[in-house]
Image (tube, rainbow, N blue to C red):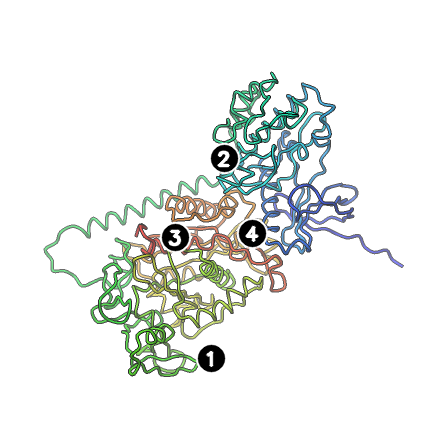
Amino acid sequence: MSAHPPEELEFHTPQGDPVRFAVRYGEDTRPPGPPHRWTRPLTLGAGWSVTQVRLPASAQGDPRAYTLLEREVTAAVALERRYGAEKFAAVFTRIVGYDLDCAEPFVLYHQSAGAPLSEALPDLGAEQHRHIVGQLAFAVRLLDDVGLVHRALAPDTVRWDGSHVRLSEPYAVLRAGEAREPFGAAPWASPEQRAGSGAADSRDDLWSVARIAYLLHSGHPGPPGRTDRADGPPDDLGDYRRLAVLAQSGLFAAEAAARPSPAALLRLLRLPDPLAHTAGAADPLDAGRQRYTTELARKQAVLRAAREDAEEPTHEPPSPPPRRGGLRALLFGDPPDRPGRPGSPDRPTDSGPPSVEQAEDGTRMCPHCLLPVAYDESLLVTIDAKGNRIRLDLSAENRPGRRQDLLRTAYQLCPDGGDGDEAHELPVPYLTNGRPLSIAFVGSSAVGKTHLMAAMLGEVELGGLEPYGLKCLPLNPEAHRTYLRERVQRLQQGRQLGRTGQQTFARFADGLLVSAPGRVPRPVVFFDLAGEDLVQDGAVTSFLLGVDAFVFVVDPLRALRMPSLDPVRERYGLPRRDLGDEAFATVLNRLDRPHGFVAAPAALAVNKSDLLRFEPVVDDWLGRALPARHDPAAETAESRDAYAFLAHHASPAWLKPFDDCARCSLHFVAATGGQARDDRFPHGARPRRVLGPLVSIFAACGLLEGSDR
């Protein structure tokens, strides 16, 4: 009988390369730290001993568990990529590899030598005390330069091998500037960290260094028999001469702001700063950032000159209002005029159906057929469960409340819809509220448009726009419930969405009524067409000529010249394209370009950014929550970084939306947060920053109060 083949373990190195080893597993243990982590020793190949930290299936019911492990891996990779080639990297527990997409996600570490400080303490002398404190300060300095706060420095988690300290795995790490999360215990964790107040700061770790230094020199965590103020310096700090410099520096201060910086602490300890004189490698994205700034300034100069020309007095008779997408929209940022629609700001009116803001003839432009349509009660219908249109007669309904409720769920037939597939209707609220806004998602098949829209509207349903002062209601309650059930809930259950089917006539996927306090609600409709439809100049895409704004969705698998993506490309059979996205070119080439630019605001969303989460610039943005209010400076900074990233890793064709549109922001987003396996996302869908493109478009179109239109 033949022996069973050895088990194999496949994972990625910190550089993103896939590797495979024969493996033998040891016994599970529970390490210090969050309860979801389990560790066991592994032997790779012929005898390479490593430690595996994994998230067992039994712990995956906690939605936070995966996020914490992913954060740990991201920090470990960042440290390895930055310092792995340096000798001083020994102060960190070094990562070997990871797999965050398998059934039980894991990270592998080199085994740590030495013993915890709590065990080594009796055998340490004064010189070793000095070395330990200095190396801890040095480690915090390295973390600070990468923008990380370790948050788990304590006698049980810091090891000493006789010559070097080694920090534990970064299982409690936060980015500097992120909201603090409560973690740790007195006296090792700072008061602010234990309370979870304010923003994480590298000086949180210096509090821990100070308390470890006190332990080393005093032999105890606090004075026995005396009250130790856990939120300030120990009562007997002055009794230890070797701690005088640290005490005078403010290192024991209860608030992080009063403590010295890591670099300043090294100077106080008279220790060299290894980063002080290192020039470091040039950032390959800097050229792209400069190009973004140059191109943005060029656009602004062209538009400024055109605006000045338009504002010069003239003796010619006034010209008629420009057509949709014309010079007025380009220069002044006003939502493009539609036939019969006034250019005045949204405001309530005193006549017509409730909340109506209408032109002199009461028309809107139908977003499907691009023809004028006015509110007409003789054309009202309801739609039953089978999709049949049933005429709605309100002539005998005199109860205002009942009438309003019926109109909320009613449709009006478009008089120019005709018969067959082109027959269509509009929700009544589309015709009886403020200026409508239509948004089209653009990209080839399987780039993730459908997932991104579902994730975006799921965040809206969870109140994601409320911090921006916006309230959202369904444009039609039944249609919205259907979309939530068939798209949003399916995605939230971790199920992959099917591809969008081709259409013979473009219809919007869902619609919202979006309002800010004191302003008339505005209908917002979202179009999601199959990529096969978008790459053709057919009748089905004629609606694009009337679209107010665009979300162009970039697929990294098609766009980026990054070898780490090759295995994923091979798995899904997706070739890389240097010619850009066919749908981008087809749509943009179809639109008017006053003064060389498409007037409609646009957002370029680098979707599936979870595939790029270990790239420093992507991690820097994808790991942040969106700000609680629209921040134009942050939007510009992210746009600059995303532009530079695409310019460095992709051909110029992928930046065509930015080049062609007068106003185009760029965003890192992840609609699902992971790769699907057998039509499911093993660890659930975890959308990230998906509202960024929508908030940018809302700001450009004047929906956000105080936004720059």
The residue tagged with tag 1: helix, strand or loop? loop
Q: Which residue is mark 3?
A: 468
The residue tagged with tag 4: helix, strand or loop? helix
Residue 280: give x, y in percent of width and height.
52, 31
For the residue pair 544 and 150, the one nearer the viewer reads as 150
For the residue pair 236 and 654, the one nearer the viewer reads as 236
The residue tagged with tag 2: helix, strand or loop? loop
Looking at the image, which residue sits at the far left? 315
Indicate the amino acid at tag 4: Leu
Quarter-of-image position of residue 231:
top right
Of marks 2 and 1, the one in the foreground: 1
For residue 611, the mark is 4
Q: Which image quarter holds the N terminus?
A: bottom right
Of marks 3 and 4, the one in the foreground: 3
Of callouts 3 and 4, the N-terminal one: 3
For residue 385, the mark is 1
Residue 73: give x, y in percent of width and height.
61, 44
Indicate the amino acid at tag 2: Ala
378 relative position to 45: left or right: left
Indicate the amino acid at tag 1: Ala
Q: Disc 2 versus disc 1: distance between alpha carbons? A: 62 Å
Q: Are marks 2 and 4 in contact (CB under 8 Å)?
A: no
Q: Are marks 2 and 1 in contact (CB under 8 Å)?
A: no
Q: Disc 3 versus disc 4: distance between alpha carbons? A: 29 Å
Of callouts 1 and 3, the N-terminal one: 1
Q: Residue at x 27, y 74 (%)?
A: 374
Residue 593: give x, y in percent of width and height.
30, 58
